[in-house]
Image (spheres, rainbow, N blue to C red):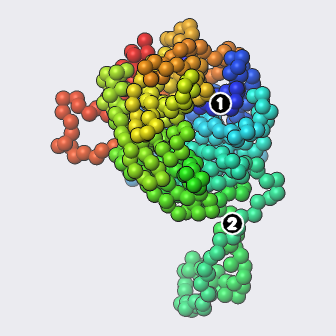
Amino acid sequence: MKIPYNCLHVQGSTLFAARGGKIHSFSLTHNSYIATWKHPDLDTFIAAGGLQIDHAGKDCDDPDDSVMVDEAEQPPSKRQKVTEDAQDDKDDSTKPKRNRGKDERKPKPNPVPDRPVIIQLATTPSGSHVVAVSGNDKAVWVFSHDGSGHLTELSKRIMPKRPSAIQVTLELEIIVADKFGDVYCIPLLKSTAPYTPPARPSVSKPFTKPAASVLTVHSKGNRAALAAQQREMENPTNATSAAAGSQRAEGPDFEHTLLLGHVSMLTSLLIGRDRQNRKYILTSDRDEHIRVSRYMPQSHVIHGYCLGHAEFVGDMAIADSREETLVSGGGDDELFVWNWVTGELLCKTNILKSVKEVVPEATKVAVSRVFSNSYVSETDIETHIIVICEGVPALFTWQLLKDTNTLTKPGIIQLPGKPLDLAITTNRVVVALHVAEDASGEAARALHIIDLELEDGRLAVEEIEPVQDDEPEKEELEMSYKDIRSLFYTVEHLRKQQASAPEDAPEDGEGKGDGERQQVDEAAAAAEE
């Protein structure tokens, strides 16, 4: 099957849709294709056969490999024990080898890059620039936008860790949250002048004369250490400057500011304003926390927390026209509505009940995306919340009441595939779908425009039509179902596994973990049909 669209963003009448390592642009007015930007590593990946080999030497299509692991997270390989007899046989069989000259050595194979995938998209408020994040190389890309869907690459900046969320501010700054819990601020436009990082203040101890001497030190290693100490005594300036130089070498080689940090992986990032128009940074993490921090330059000051989640927080959204109301969801069975300024929990509503109407066998949910939508009717503007649950072929909607800030009138919009992302315009949404391999006709399209209407106060489908992407569809790569799951179905992996003793193991097939998840996937696939 073709790789699906996984990230969407609408700016005016232009839709930007990320599909693997490409960013396609479409006109929503004429429902037509405009242009494509392609990641530079994509051609190298395709030329190498599109085959990803992990560090243990196994193909990623191996059934035993279920998730992609970063290089830094790979455990070191163990040395194999060799018996004395085997070692003697090995020594007898070995023959002295002639040292090859420099010209006779075999060339090292060029490393195959990871599959390029765009995982984040954002634009400036005016739409003059587009910001994208590629997960394979931890890069933040900035493009100029001509207003008609054509992109021109301006800069590429490699972050220390893989970004997990971004926001573009009115001051033309990019706020970047990464998977290791840090939040950075970088300017939208990269300076052409060489970047000189500020030297960190360091407290150096005064050099003292070593107590040892050549008369008391005899080994070669200790004598080398003693000689180094004596050189530092003779010229302490060189040692101090070398230490300072090593400190400057750390971190990105472009202008950046570290704003705040979590002790867990960040999953979502928002910029909020209170009624006094003061700005805050809202961050959520895998450890069930939603933190509210002051904005720059006091981002290190924690304003408060929204505490109540028992599982990871997958995503959150600030309600339209209600800047102090926050809706969050994740691994819990409920959606949470907060006053994020005070940290007060306003209400909860069960989402698992709605999911069971689509997938009756579901026992847990993983909320991957939360959106706020303002529906403009003839008499009023209503705020509705739209939620995507990972692996469930439907959109779940609620109306957010004005007076009480409670969620009411739940609705379900059935889809011909599993939604991966959503982009909202006035009274319509664009949804990226992972459709079944055997789907045909209009249902096999990966990108759909849904015109919305109200039925008894609930969002419903007035009309659905596919986005005309025949031209870029011809150039897309084939990908196995397992590779698609490993790339785009990662929210459920945020759930922490409960440790249990052998005697507490479930009986009669209860609590099967991955097997249970597979049953839910099969039921969701049956619901699509």
Q: Is residue 347 left or right of residue 74?
A: left
Q: Secondary structure at mark 1?
A: strand
Q: Quadrant of the N terminus?
A: top right
| Residue 58 visible within the image | no
Q: Residue at x 21, y 39 (%)?
A: 505
Lower position in the chain sequence, tag 2 or tag 1:
1
Image x and y of residue 439, in percent: 51, 11
Numbered circles on residues, count = 2
Residue 206 vs residue 170, the one in the foreground: 170
Q: For the point 56% across and 80% down, which residue is it?
A: 222
Residue identifier under label 1: 10
Quarter residue 254 falls in: bottom right
- Residue 37: name its quadrant: top right
Report helix, strand or loop for mark 2. helix
Q: Nearer the viewer, residue 215 or 87?
A: 215
Residue 268 point in image, percent of width and height: 52, 44
- Along the viewing direction, whichever of 352 and 82 lies nearer the viewer: 352
Residue 470, position as x, y percentages in the image: 67, 14
Cα separation between marks 2 and 1: 40 Å
Please tell me whether mark 2 or mark 1 is closer to you in this view.
1
